[in-house]
Structure formats: structure tokens, C-alpha cells
Amino acid sequence: MEKTFLDRLNAGEILVADGATGTNYQAMGIEIGVPPEEWVFDQPEKVLALHRAFVDAGSDIILTDTFGGTRLRMRDSKYADRAPELNRRAAELARQAALTRAGVLVAGSMGPTGMLMEPFGELTHDAAADAYAEQAAALTEGGVDFLLLETFFALAEAQAAIEGVQRASALPLVVSFSYDQGTRTMMGLGPTQVVRAIAPLGVAAIGANCGKSLDAMEQIVKEMAALKTGIPLWIKPNAGLPRMDGDIARYDTAPATMAEYTTRYIDAGAQIVGGCCGNSPAHVAAMARAAKHAQPM
């Protein structure tokens, strides 16, 4: 019987997650303005191809193409009325790709709604919780191994999302914030504030993804690790800062640089490492080789 996500975390294994979805889809021809989730129905063979490329690169974990898959985030999509079906199908596609190599895990990706919570905006706690409960249930039905709330920046929305997810699914849950202001989120939260608020909520791992720079991410890892919660750290940074080429964001950080920082993050206390925006299968392959050398003896 294969080890579960929790089994592998508890054993101290270093796990490598995949790279970017959106920026790789751009290279595969997605049109500007098209939500990546729509490719689950419109271009499933390309969704599968990217998943398989990350598996071939050495990813232990691949993320479903459902970052914007809550009903609230999909409200302007042509598939707005098919949110649960889309999430189930995305999970099935990722599961299909994961079967090409033994031991590959599938994470059900859930990003922020794109709305502000009360009192800053119109989104209520209950509406957010219900949206994430619906998405989590569909991803669970589709066969993911664990659930991932990623790129959050507001504590209230994350707490509502956690409540909804845990109401709908018994799968392990990872929660990751984006510190796009260096070592602070858009709402001014620091890593210590986030960890102290999220750690008591029964999550399997806490982390940071996307963000501003590789050096800032290293500071975040060190700050989180210093809290000594015993909860594994999930770290998935961008390939550095982008430069704009017309409407396209270009990331110039080389795979070797991502590999170097992967080693630094693991040395600082990260247990799950991967790449966010700008990270191609080549970047992930370099990170996977670095992580293999960093595996505990």
C-alpha cells in the first residue's frame, strides 16, 4: 500500500511540488484573458501534458488546474454554472497524469475568490465558507490526495475557507499565503501572525507561495521555522520577479538559481518545495535534483 501524504510528511520526507500553471499555459498558447480553469473542458489534452511534464521532471506533487475554481471566482466564466463538475474533472485529469509514476500525489488547488471580505468588501464569511466547501467536496470526489488553499493574503478569507473545507472534506489541508510585499501580505500580515492564527486549526502544513523575491522567501521560511510549531512548511516561490513583455510576464531566473534556493529553503526548514509563477518543468527538474541531495539520511 502506498504511503499517504501525511505518512510521508510524518516520515520527514522532502517532497517536491510542481511549477506554474498560468505562465506555462501562456507558452502553450492560451489567449490572454482566458481563465486557465477553462482549459479543463476546452483543452484537456494540454492540461494533461503539463501535468505529465511536471511528473517527468520529478514532481512528487502536482496541483489541479482549479486555482480559480470556486463558484465565486468563476462567476464571469462561461462555465460559471458548472463549477463542481469542472473541479471534479480537473482532479480526474491530474490523477490520470499522476499514475504515470508511482508515488505522485495530487493536491486540490484552491485560490482566493478575488473578492474582499466584509467590512472591506461584499464577501461574507458564510458565503466564502460555502464556496470553499463546494469546491473541496468536488475535488475530494475527483480523487485528490489532499487539499491546498494557496496564495491567500487576508486572514478572514483564509479562516472562512478553512472552515468550509473542513466541513466538506476529511482530507489533509495545506494553507499557503502570498507575501507579495516582501515579508508581508497585501493586507500587511507577517509570517508569524499567519502561523499563529492558522497553526491551531488542524492543518497538515503551512506555507508561502508566489511572493516577491527568492531572498524574501528565505526570510519567510526562517521566520516560520523559528516558531517551532512542528507543522511542516510548504514553500513554492515565483521564479523571481517578472519583467513585462507587452502583456506577457517574463521570468528570467534560471533553473540553476531555483535549485540553489531550493537547497537554502530546505536547510532553513522547508519540507515541501516547488515553484509558482514562471517555473517551467526545467526549473522543477533542477529543484527536484537539489531536493534529492537534501533528503535526510
Image (cartoon, rainbow, N blue to C red):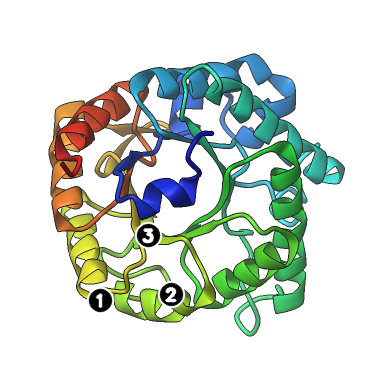
Vertical position of residue 31 compared to residue 168: above or below: above
Lower sequence index among marks 1 and 2: 2
Q: Is residue 124 visible?
A: no
Residue at mark 1 to residue at mark 2: CA–CA distance: 10 Å
Residue at mark 3 to residue at mark 1: CA–CA distance: 13 Å
Q: x and y percent of residue 63 in the render?
A: 52, 38
Q: Are marks 1 and 2 in contact (CB under 8 Å)?
A: yes
Which sits in the foreground, 110 or 94?
94
Which sits in the foreground, 138 or 271?
271
Q: x and y percent of residue 233 in the render?
A: 33, 58
> Which-is-in-front pick, marks 3 and 1?
1
Task: Quadrant for the N terminus, please.
Answer: top right
Residue at mark 3 to residue at mark 2: CA–CA distance: 11 Å
Q: x and y percent of residue 103 in the render?
A: 46, 30
Q: Amino acid at mark 3?
A: Gly
Measuring 34% from the left and 63% from the top, which residue is drawn there?
179
Q: Amino acid at mark 2?
A: Ala
Measuring 71% from the left and 69% from the top, which residue is drawn there?
129
Q: Residues within 10 Å of mark 3 (few under 14, many from 20)?
A: many
Lower sequence index among marks 3 and 2: 2
> Which-is-in-front pick, marks 3 and 2?
2
Q: Residues within 10 Å of mark 1 (few under 14, many from 20)?
A: few
Q: Amino acid at mark 1?
A: Leu
Vertical position of residue 54 compared to residue 113: above or below: above
Task: Quadrant for the C terminus, please.
Answer: top left
Q: Residues within 10 Å of mark 2 (few under 14, many from 20)?
A: some
Which sits in the foreground, 243 or 172?
172
- What residue does disc 3 label? 207
Q: x and y percent of residue 194 in the render?
A: 40, 75
Q: Secondary structure at mark 2?
A: helix
Residue 199 is tagged as 2
